[in-house]
Amino acid sequence: MNTEENRTTDPLLVYKDSRPSQVQLEFWSSRYVLFVENLSVSFDGFKAVDIPHYGVKHGELRVIIGPNGAGKSTFCDLVSGKTKASTGKVFFDSREISSLDESEIALLGIGRKFQTPTVFDSLSTYENMLLALPGNQGWKKNLFDRETKNEREQILEILSKVGLLEQRNELAKSLSHGQRQWLAISALIISKPKLLLVDEPAAGLTDQETEQTADLLLELANDHTLVVIEHDMDFVRRLNSTVTVLNEGKVLAEGCLEEMEKNEQVMEAYLGR
């Protein structure tokens, strides 16, 4: 199918304000691992998110930027089930997930890493990974029942990928901020989610850690769909991916970062120029 045909048949491009048809919904499911329609949420009368339509393709690395209060984290809250929408629907992997709770959505294959790394400081790096093994939610089972050979190999492979193999026996509290970020991401990917929501992975990192984190996300993008929320424009530039700009809960613009930096509306809303 040529580019012109794509432009005229992609429902995300031709859909306006009317409710999408069943044919459109089926088309979206085949093309997008995540899409939303008429999604909004209000807090005390303020619409934090108001998105008629939005999709992330299978295997895509999408970056979401925007000023503080633009609705970036709230959007991820709606997708992950942490917050329930006021209106609209969320579809993931051909299934509507709007009414599911957070744990059910996680089991379907959506992993969420918050801005502050969620790790257990009193446990070692390896023990944190044991706790994250899928299907073994009881901490006593994970820590006192011996892991299988396959599980051990999986953990060591992931820790090697993120550069934490040498720190596998160190307590998490002794890791640097960047290493804690990588451990939090590792704990997510061991369950092999189809979609990773990563909130400000470069926050508080050194220059070297920022570069390593960008490389890690690019490597993970080979096996997962990623949605990355970020403020650091140098970091976003390293990812070299499609950027969505949110402002006041709405999608303001989309494209490569160079295009966004030349967009006057984006400059005014986000970059302050």
Image (cartoon, rainbow, N blue to C red):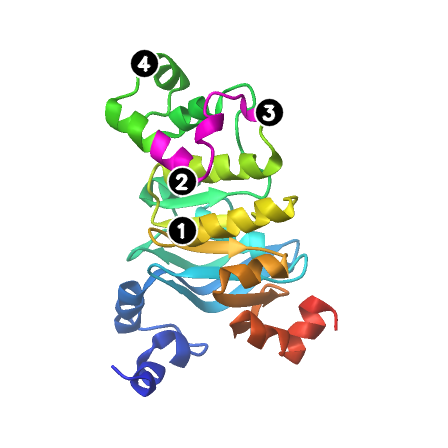
**Residue 150 lies within the magenta run:** no
- The residue sitting at 56% across, 70% down in the picture is 257
**Residue 160 lies within the magenta run:** yes
Q: Is residue 180 visible from the viewing direction of this image?
A: yes
- The residue sitting at 36% across, 57% down in the picture is 91
Residue at image mark 4: 145
Is label 4 in contact with label 2 (beta carbons under 8 Å)? no
User: Which mark, residue 174?
Assistant: 3
Image quadrant where one finds the C terminus? bottom right
Q: Position of residue 270 (x, y in %)?
A: 68, 67
Which of the two discs, 3 and 4, sits closer to the camera?
3
Dot 1 amino acid type: Glu
Q: Position of residue 143 (x, y in %)?
A: 39, 16
Count neighbours of disc 4 (C-alpha within 10 A) and say few if under 14, some if 14 to 19, many if 20 or more.
few
Dot 2 amino acid type: Lys
Q: Nearer the viewer, residue 92 or 84?
A: 92
Q: Secondary structure at mark 3?
A: helix
Is label 1 in contact with label 2 (beta carbons under 8 Å)? yes
Q: Is residue 77 visible from the viewing direction of this image?
A: no
Specify which label sits upstream in the sequence, 3 or 2: 2
- The residue sitting at 39% across, 72% down in the picture is 19
Specify which label sits upstream in the sequence, 4 or 2: 4
Specify which label sits upstream in the sequence, 1 or 2: 2
Dot 3 amino acid type: Ser
